[in-house]
Image (cartoon, grey):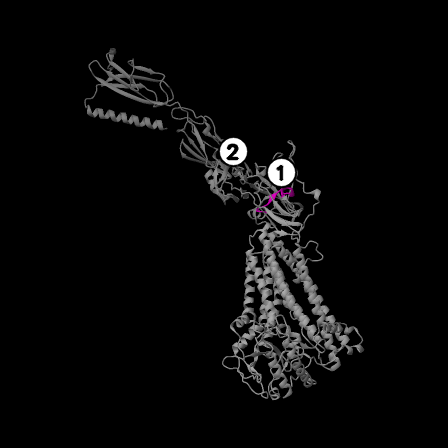
Amino acid sequence: MGLLHFLHLYAAFVAVMVVMHLLINPVESTVLIRFHQTPPALSRHSYAVFRYSFETLRGLNACQDNSCSIHCQLDGKTLSSCPANVIVLKNLTVNRDHEFLLNVTTSDGQRNSTTFSWFIDTVPPTATIFSKQNYTNDERVAVEVTFSEPCNGPGGFKCVNSSNCDLIIKGSAHVIASSLRIVKPGMNYNLDIIIPMTNTFGRVVITMRDGICTDQAGNQFIRTNGSTIIIHFDRRPVQVDLWTSVPSYELVLDAVPRTVLATNKMEDLKIFLDFSSPIMNTTAEVLMALHVNSGNMVPIYEKNRGTRRFDFELKNVSRTEIITIELQAYLIIGKTGAPVSPAASITFLYDSLEPGVWLSTSSPNFTKESNINVIVEFTKPVFVFEASMVDVTGGKVTRFKKLSGALYSVTVLAVTQKLVSVTIPAGRVNDISGNPNLASNQLQVKHYSIPLISAALHSFMTAGILATSLAAAVLSVSNANLGAIDTLASGSSNIVASDPSINLHGMVGHIQVFVLSDWLSVNHPIEYSETTKGLRWLIPHQKLPWKEDSASVWPNHALLEEDKLPRKFSAFSEGWPSNEKTNYQIDLYATNNSYMRLVPLEIDPKSGKLRRQHNMNMRNTPYGQNLDTEEYIIYFLRGEPLSASNVVKRMENDKGWQDLEMNLFWLGVGGGGLVILHVLILLFLRWRTGTTAQGILLVPRFELFLLMLMLPCISQSSAFVIRGGTTGGIITGALLLAIPAAFILSVCLFLIIAIFSGVLAQYKEVKNVGSKAPWYRKLWFFITMRPIMGMWFCREGLPSSFYARFGILFDTKKGPPLFVFVDRNDPNTIPKWTESGHNGIGRMRAVSSDDSNEEIRVLLSRRLLGCARSFYTVIDLLRRISLGIISGTYSSKKASQSMLALTITLLQFMYLFTLKPYISRGVHMVESVSLLCEVGIFVLFITTTGTNPTEAQHLGFIMLAFLFISFVTQLINEWYALINSLVRLSHPHTNSLKLGLKFAARGLILPFLPRKHWSTFRPASSQPKIGLAPVLPLSPEREVKRRDLRAPCIDPISSMSATVVPVLSPGSPSPDVIQTLGSVTAETNLSGQRIAEGRRLKGPRLEPKSDLKKLRELARASFSGDPKGEEASTSYGYRL
């Protein structure tokens, strides 16, 4: 068609040129050339025949007798011969334009020329069938038929019906003749093909019938490749398989198989997409449809297979990643137009980091236990780990337990008294990705036996505490029995005794502090640590009787016989035969019946390591659903449900509950047993004597004593369970902490109401103003405390048992004072109590022996100072409670614990040193020594970090020295009180320890004797010959009647006269003072006894002349025996 158009244009051009030539040459030629035969303008033949003639204008032959000269040219080339009337051109070039030029010149010179052009077309017409729906799922498919050139003859393209149509349909489809549309006659036709919806998938072949038409050159239509198309139809959704070459494993969770994908090699990070049918998208578009959470996806073009298979690989991935690849299927369309079904995302673990391993132990660096518990903690789960992979020097593995894939417990038995070393070399075990483990740290534990000095010292201290406690208990019961019998005989008790356990609380309390210090430091010297462990019964913290190994924190240990150590996987180290492979199921989590296995799990016979299986197609994989990101974290990284951190935390929590049980069980046994024993003693004495028990046996003095000793144990127990962080532990710990908190609050309220306000008890103190001490003695008094004479008095109307019941809270401390002043330089003066002066101490004036004395009320500042001194009991309890909490709060010992304990102890020592709250200087010195020893211990705890064994041993001896000094000073102080109490029992006869022991023995066996023999055990005199109570400043009888009378707290049964008598205590310089005061005091007490009979609850009534003179002499004598101000420690008792 294009060639014909070209010929038309060429003919027009020639005609125009001829016309122009005629116009330029207006002379008309007289010779005419006529063609009688020419080839058609479009010819399918390779030859041409031209017949022509030459005529004049008149129609005559212009070339008669061959008189003309004729020249012919073909396509610009002159022909060798040119006949006069016909020429035949053969073997012409086909499929191109040709031009024939004929030039004639007559004999008379007339000339003319003409040309003829034609095109030789030998190309047959053909048609191309085109459809935009070569891949479709539609029912109607539009087809376009386009001929290569007009093909109209004979009749051209036609389609009458589906059976008479030049378009042939092969397949499950038919043409709709009515849909024929002629776009351009002979050239373009459109029509529709119907594919029935009943057919799901297949293909339809559409082709043209041969010879249906011819072109203008007469070439007949022939069919070519373009004349046939294939229509693919598929109404099924496009399936896609997203898979990877990462090795796959099977993880069985609760009997459900799951698929695990993990690798440590970059070359395994290949992703493949297989579509069930071709898609329309390009590789770049498919890449855009893939979403990866880490790294970059790069296509592998040389492996892509058309539009059904696409290969990619991951680049730039960090060393440890959980990679998730998702296909956004909605962005991909099949060639048939069908949507792509969603594909499950694929998640796998890429991990090139070697698993680290850390060894830790619940045993200290130095231990006497033969079994050393070791926890093997991997940074991530590993597989096929066994006991033989643990290298032990100086011991052997006796227990091995798998707690999780990342946590194992091992028990090592120390076989020698040397260093036990435990380590795991590198490359012993692999993780799920195939990474071998790194070398572990080297765990070293020194095994030792208990040093002899430690065993001897804690045995000595245990014997001393038990013996002292037993002696105090026996003496207290004896005193109570004697007092009860004396009361039955005379109506009132004449037996004067002190509390034999007055210093026992302080002694045991300070030993408890040393025991609690064992929880405060890591680097304890062995000598000190073993000594304090031997004294833990004072907390108490001991193994439970029903648990053989309560110190072990490893759950579910599996005992292994020595000759049956785990060899289940011995082939991994020994190797398999070269032609064998073995499949195993690797136990992963014994706690939930889950396991992991490689399918098949192949073991390399040479290396003993796992061989990995590559998935070539996920459709052929028999595993279950892939693990998701969270599950990879749970089972293969640190956050697994049974991970090392969680197990360790659970173990610590379990150990906290075990410690709580150890504390509270023995606390209940010991404390409950003592309380029951106390109740039984009270019931027995009441049954035998018919009266209520007297003195320190009264409730709740003994119970308060026990409770104050229990507070560190209770506070430590609460800290043990709170540190676990569980809800139950926090609630239990808070409830336990409420006990010491309530007790401290109760003591504070008691001190405020009863002591600070002076409503129930009043502290009185005698002060000397007549002499001045030199500066060195003042300095000594500043350090050691000035000797004083003080006493507590109860208000009138209070029960006589008030002091005996609650005196343990305040009786040894000073309080808000009332002062009486004595001038030592004037023996003719007696103290006169007046109102406080501007100096806050009170004024004193000398009066005659007949004048009266007045009580001095001090300023507010003095009272506040006295309140702070009485508050020392609370300070001491708070410190021991705080140390109990500190010792149980931390699961691992830290230096901050020792620093905090040191700070608290220093604060208490500064409180003691500054305020000097004790009445007795001896008790003050003992308390100061004990606190300084504790300070030294805590300082050494801080300084022992990193010391070598020799230095640690020396420091241990120093610590033992501190402990020994503190205990011995407390022991001496308590035994002095016991001996003093025994001596007082002999006062009706003489100051004899032997006689005191005799009376104590009598008092102990009295309840078991018949009543008729009780009278023989009473002292011969109703009054002692030596005063046993602190001196009170006396007022005349009229002042006694006018003021609110106070009964001395030393008399819980009857209102007896109280006197101040200094007696020997540690550091007392002069026994002569006692003898000087003895006779005076005895007379005074005798007089007071006569007045007090029948007036038990009405306070002191004194004779105005003789008794006052005697007491004045006593007041002067109390200072005359110590001109240098030395203290004869004031001991005091109460009547039974």
Q: Is residue 556 left or right of residue 182?
A: right
Q: Is residue 724 visible?
A: no
User: Amino acid type of disc 2?
Assistant: Val
Callout 1: helix, strand or loop?
loop
Note whether 1064 is above or below 202 in the view shown.
below
Magenta stretch in the rendered image: 377-391
Crowd around label 2: few <14 · some 14–19 · many ≥20 (10 Å): some
Note whether 952 is above or below 118 in the view shown.
below
Q: Is residue 583 visible?
A: yes
User: Amino acid type of disc 1?
Assistant: Leu
Q: Is residue 922 left or right of residue 674?
A: left
Report the quarter where the N terminus lies. top left
Horizontal and vertical percent position of residue 690:
76, 77
Q: Is residue 335 left or right of residue 514?
A: left
Residue at image mark 1:
601
Callout 2: helix, strand or loop?
strand
Residue at image mark 2:
204
382 in the magenta segment:
yes
